Image (spheres, rainbow, N blue to C red):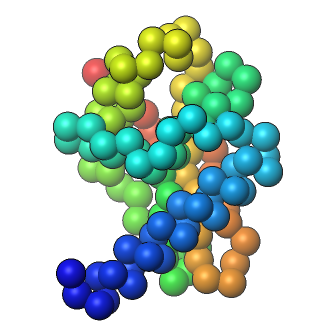
Amino acid sequence: MSRRRQKARAFGLQAESLASFWLRLKFYHIVARNVVAPGGEIDLVARRGDLIVFVEVKARPSLDQAHLAIDSAKATRISRAARYWLAANDWAAGRNFRGDAVFVAPWRRPRHVEGAVPLDIFA
């Protein structure tokens, strides 16, 4: 792995840790990290009350660049992974679901955007 790629990976892992911390401050309980499924992945799965939230974490040089990094193809992959996670976690049946994002940029407070990722759970 190149030095540049290692640096980007470390930045991404730090962003996920910061996003996890930020969500915990907002009374979310992190129930899973780095969920890998056929055709998709989810950075964080969080729970607050009856709500299960599938969270995409995007780290970029600016918060606006991070926001632009989620497109419809990414939402499709997250939805695919969410269906996989739900099938493996029957305790989550009957709960409400949402796709959120946490955007991270250096020297900025993370931005948690509820509903930023449109989910198609029942495709």
* Residue at the spot 41% in from the left edge and 58% down from the top edge: 70
Q: Would you identify the image quadrant in which residue 121 lies?
A: top left
Residue 122 versus residue 29: which sits nearer the camera?
Answer: 29
Q: How many marks?
A: 0
Percent coordinates x, y for residue 69 in the rendering: 40, 65
Q: Is residue 79 above or below residue 71?
A: above
Residue 114 versus residue 1: which sits nearer the camera?
Answer: 1
* 52 horizontally vs 3: left or right: right
Q: Is residue 87 above or below residue 43?
A: above
Quadrant showing the C terminus: top left
Residue 72 versus residue 33: which sits nearer the camera?
Answer: 33
Residue 77 seen in render: no
Q: Is residue 19 above or below residue 29?
A: below
Quadrant showing the N terminus: bottom left
Percent coordinates x, y for residue 79 in the rendering: 35, 35
Percent coordinates x, y for residue 16 in the rendering: 53, 61
Residue 45 seen in render: yes
Percent coordinates x, y for residue 87 in the rendering: 35, 18
* Residue at the spot 29% in from the left edge and 33% down from the top edge: 80
* 76 horizontally vs 34: left or right: left
Q: Would you identify the image quadrant in which residue 115 lies?
A: top right
* Residue at the spot 61% in from the left edge and 40% down from the top edge: 30
Q: Residue furthest bottom?
A: 3
